[in-house]
Amino acid sequence: MLQRQAEQPLYLQLADHIADDIREGIYASGSKVPSVRKLAQQHGVSISTVTQAYAWLEDQGWISARPQSGYYVRSDIAPDSDERPPLSLGDEPRDVTKGEFINQMLTRINRSATVNLGAAIPHISWLPQRALQTHIQKVSRFQTADVLNYTFSPGVEELRSHIAVRMRDVGVRCLSDDIVVTHGCAEALTLCLRSVTQPGDLVAVESPCYYGFLQIAKMLNLKVIEIPTDPQTGISIDALKLALQQWPIKAIEVSSRYSNPTGCSIPAENQQQLVALAQQYEVPVIEDDIYGDISFPTLRGQKQAVNSVLKTYDKDGWVLYCSSFSKTVAAGLRVGWCIPGRWKNKVMENQTFTTFSASSLSQYALLSYLQNGHYDRHLRQFRTQAATNMQRFIQAVRDYFPPGTKINEPAGGFILWVALPQGVDAMALHYDALQASIVVTPGGLFSNTEHFSNFIRLSAAVPWNEQTEQALKTLGALAEKQM
């Protein structure tokens, strides 16, 4: 009951009651809270008092107002730890054995479907199509000689200068000469890994990790050791240190922000510890930050967004930073980059005798796009859309998936990692979903082990509509049927 004679104002007492109810799950994430009039009647207070309470809760990030609808609990309030997927187990060194399986799965994941939640590629409607078309036509007309000629490693100098300026946003002070433009982030990762290893070497990776890195490791005849990883804070620094002490690890591969598939971000303190380990053991770190630009607003209940990367703390060139514009501008442009530190010359040598550099047309078109200031405006819209969709997906999973399902709520990106209850087979769910023309990615794709047989990855970068919601409802029903 509200205490009218207490020192704390009535509206704050009421707000605390509502916040407590949200914490305890009485008002679920995404659900509607009582109307102003109803809450006033329940507590015997004025409309003004309830309005003040809701305004305070909205300011603090607990609820959000929807025009002509009312107030709703924000879906991006961080869940209790028992609602998140558990810390992964890791594994001992072994050869990559899932190369053929990954290739087979990619054929299905990238196929046309009524609702494709498997491919980690933004829907075309999310991307700046018209602006890119304008700049492609512009450079094709006025820079014909440049776009039709070879571009050699390390890539177009003005584009590298723009990237160098953008790296200041995460505290990385580099020059254009430190950057190598690549044919997407995949080539950046491949060039970096090839430059720091020899066939037969051992590489430490997150568990789970990006399946493309497993493919690259197999292609280069490398072994991998999977390190236990928290779906919220990333790779275990203690477990990594122990592995470095026990095994002859020649490289470490991690995603610093909004990892694929877990969505985890390594806190700044852990980033510094990881870089210190790399320096101590003289082991290069290949950093994948392809989702780094897609950060969400920080709200009450969420940890502060990570605004640094491993490269931020790298003073001696042990971190080889990789990223691209594929997830935010256009995958088909195939423009990525790396900052390879002390291995720059080796990376350029490997690139020169394979692809030369990324497409000349793509580099000049992207440069023109960046020069006109379009990217930052687009990013603001993209981030809002990604954050909104993520909230909708998370709420749909909570509403439609079987009890015991666990999900991580990332602070950026558009990837959702879902741990289904024990007994649900993600591969069987994948095949059942295909029959309904729905594509999802089974968790087994992201590990050289069998630890994630009941996990799936969902891509939220699709238009939210009745068809998408129905697809998630169908997935939940198919998972429930297995139980």
Image: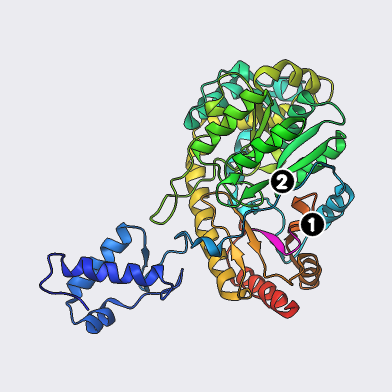
Magenta stretch secondary structure, dominant: strand
Viewer-nearest residue: 72 or 266: 266
Q: Is residue 156 above or below residue 377?
A: above
Considering only order in the chain, which callout, 1 or 2, is on the residue closer to the N terminus? 2
Q: Is residue 329 above or below residue 387?
A: above
The part of the image, by quadrant, that contains residue 50 is: bottom left
Quadrant in the picture for the C terminus: bottom right
Dot 2 amino acid type: Tyr
Viewer-nearest residue: 391 or 90: 90
Q: Is residue 304 above or below residue 61?
A: above
Determine whether the residue tagged by mark 2 lies in a helix, strand or loop. loop
Which residue sits at x=69%, y=72%?
475
Dot 1 amino acid type: Glu
Image colouring = rainbow
Q: Which mark is residue 210?
A: 2
First to last magenta residue range: 452-459
Determine whether the residue tagged by mark 1 lies in a helix, strand or loop. loop
Spot occupied by residue 419 in the image (x, y as percentages of width and height): 65, 63
Q: Which mark is residue 174?
A: none
Spot occupied by residue 184 in the image (x, y as percentages of width and height): 71, 35
Spot occupied by residue 152 in the image (x, y as percentages of width and height): 75, 19
Which residue sits at x=50%, y=59%?
388
